[in-house]
């Protein structure tokens, strides 16, 4: 069944607003609430970075039906994997088993703060592999000991576990990451509508049924398309850099410099801007054609009026996106 989600964009709003908007998103009919997990915004213009886990705990109490997901948490530097597993179990209990733990290899932007440098891409993948294995073992119950190249766990155990296992998702961007993580996870996470990813994931997973695949798509909804393009350019021009670049830059100044030549029209070519339901449905349809089962929308803009306009249109947008998946 197709799921349409709303993104709790921690980079563009404070925690109280995010909790209120989560409740509004559920009331509007969204099936899934996904949250970024950042220590910094991508660019200064976004201006926020509250703690995602605390915010999601409040969201779990402010909602009743919608699924929750981290999109995504890096369990290798800012957080030790044992701590992520404990947080995931607690959030699953608070939400009544509505939580999926989305994991990724992280970005320098958020992980540099602990002062241990930024590993190369291969090492980050190795660290994430160990972390996913540790988290899975802990969520399965019992004591866990682990000695790897990057992590050591000494007799860890989670004492409060949900009745149902917490599903694990991993963010991927190419064949190597699909083949590495499909056997370890339940859900594929990606931000590009690339059909190769779905094929590589399912082949590596070796399951009888295709796995769940959750994508994410920014839009900038509003009645004035030119104003929406300007807002998307101001706050989301970093999006076009691609994850190989985005993972390496250490701060908002780096993203400002790297995107200084990105024009508003460049952003408009890749992000639906304005109030065309058909444009949003067409862009979302590319994900479904590529094998994705769910899509989470990002409404660019962290002010109340910008979100109000989006929620007013949400029922129509959800229906159109689901129709695009049919």
Image (spheres, helix red, strand yellow):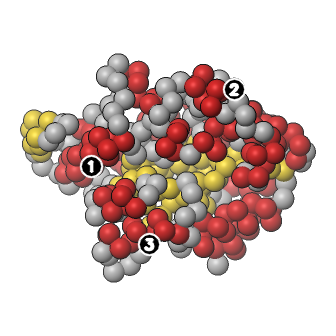
Residue at label 3?
199
Q: Is residue 102 visible?
A: yes
Q: Going 35% across and 37% down the picture, which residue do you hit?
A: 120
Residue 25: where, in percent of width, then height?
65, 50
Does residue 214 lie above or below 227 as drawn?
below
Q: Nearer the viewer, residue 58 or 245?
A: 245
Residue 179: where, in percent of width, then height?
33, 63
Q: What is the spatial separation of the Cα atoms under label 3 and label 1, in whole angstroms?
A: 20 Å
Q: Which of the 4 image quarters holds residue 44?
A: top right
- Circle 3: is it few (<14), some (14-19), or many (20+) Cα within 10 Å? some
Residue 65: where, in percent of width, then height?
53, 57
Q: Secondary structure at mark 3?
A: helix
Q: Going 59% across and 70% down the picture, which residue do you hit?
A: 288
Q: Going 30% across and 75% down the picture, which residue do you hit?
A: 206
Q: Are marks 1 and 2 in contact (CB under 8 Å)?
A: no
Q: Earlier in the sequence, mark 2 or mark 3?
A: 2
Question: Position of 276 compared to 8: left or right?
Answer: right
Residue at label 2?
45
Q: Which mark is residue 243?
A: none
Residue at label 1?
129
Q: Are marks 2 and 3 in contact (CB under 8 Å)?
A: no
- The total of numbered circles placed on residues is 3
Q: Earlier in the sequence, mark 3 or mark 1?
A: 1
Q: Secondary structure at mark 2?
A: loop
Q: Earlier in the sequence, mark 1 or mark 2?
A: 2
Q: What is the spatial separation of the Cα atoms under label 2 and label 3, in whole angstroms?
A: 37 Å
Q: Going 37% across and 56% down the picture, which residue do you hit?
A: 177
Residue 77: where, in percent of width, then height?
32, 31
Q: Nearer the viewer, mark 2 or mark 3?
A: 3
- Circle 1: is it few (<14), some (14-19), or many (20+) Cα within 10 Å? many
Q: Nearer the viewer, residue 197 or 217?
A: 197
Q: Is residue 309 visible?
A: no
């Amino acid at each position: 069944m197709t799921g349409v989600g709303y993104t709790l964009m921690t980079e563009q709003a404070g925690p109280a607003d995010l909790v209120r908007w989560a409740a509004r998103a559920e009331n509007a009919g969204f099936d899934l609430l996904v949250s970024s997990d950042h220590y910094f915004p991508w660019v200064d213009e976004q201006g926020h970075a509250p703690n995602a886990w605390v915010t999601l705990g409040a969201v779990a109490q402010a909602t009743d039906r919608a699924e929750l997901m981290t999109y995504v948490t890096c369990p290798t530097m800012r957080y030790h994997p044992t701590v992520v597993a404990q947080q995931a179990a607690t959030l699953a209990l608070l939400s009544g088993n509505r939580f999926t733990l989305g994991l990724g290899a992280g970005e320098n932007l958020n992980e540099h703060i602990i002062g241990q440098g930024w590993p190369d891409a291969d090492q980050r993948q190795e660290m994430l592999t160990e972390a996913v294995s540790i988290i899975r073992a802990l969520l399965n119950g019992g004591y866990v000991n682990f000695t790897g190249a990057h992590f050591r766990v000494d007799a860890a155990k989670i004492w409060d576990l949900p009745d149902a296992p917490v599903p694990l998702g991993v963010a991927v961007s190419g064949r190597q990451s699909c083949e590495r993580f499909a056997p370890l996870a339940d859900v594929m996470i990606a931000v590009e509508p690339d059909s190769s990813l779905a094929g590589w994931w399912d082949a590596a997973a070796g399951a009888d049924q295709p796995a769940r695949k959750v994508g994410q798509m920014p839009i900038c909804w509003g009645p004035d398309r030119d104003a929406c393009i300007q807002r998307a350019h101001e706050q989301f021009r970093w999006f076009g850099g691609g994850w190989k670049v985005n993972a390496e830059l250490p701060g908002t100044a780096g993203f400002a410099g790297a995107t200084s030549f990105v024009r508003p029209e460049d952003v408009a070519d890749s992000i639906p801007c304005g109030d065309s339901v058909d444009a949003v449905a067409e862009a979302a349809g590319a994900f479904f054609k590529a094998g994705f089962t769910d899509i989470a929308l990002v409404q660019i803009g962290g002010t109340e009026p910008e979100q109000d306009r989006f929620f007013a249109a949400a029922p129509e947008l959800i229906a159109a996106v689901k129709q695009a998946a049919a």
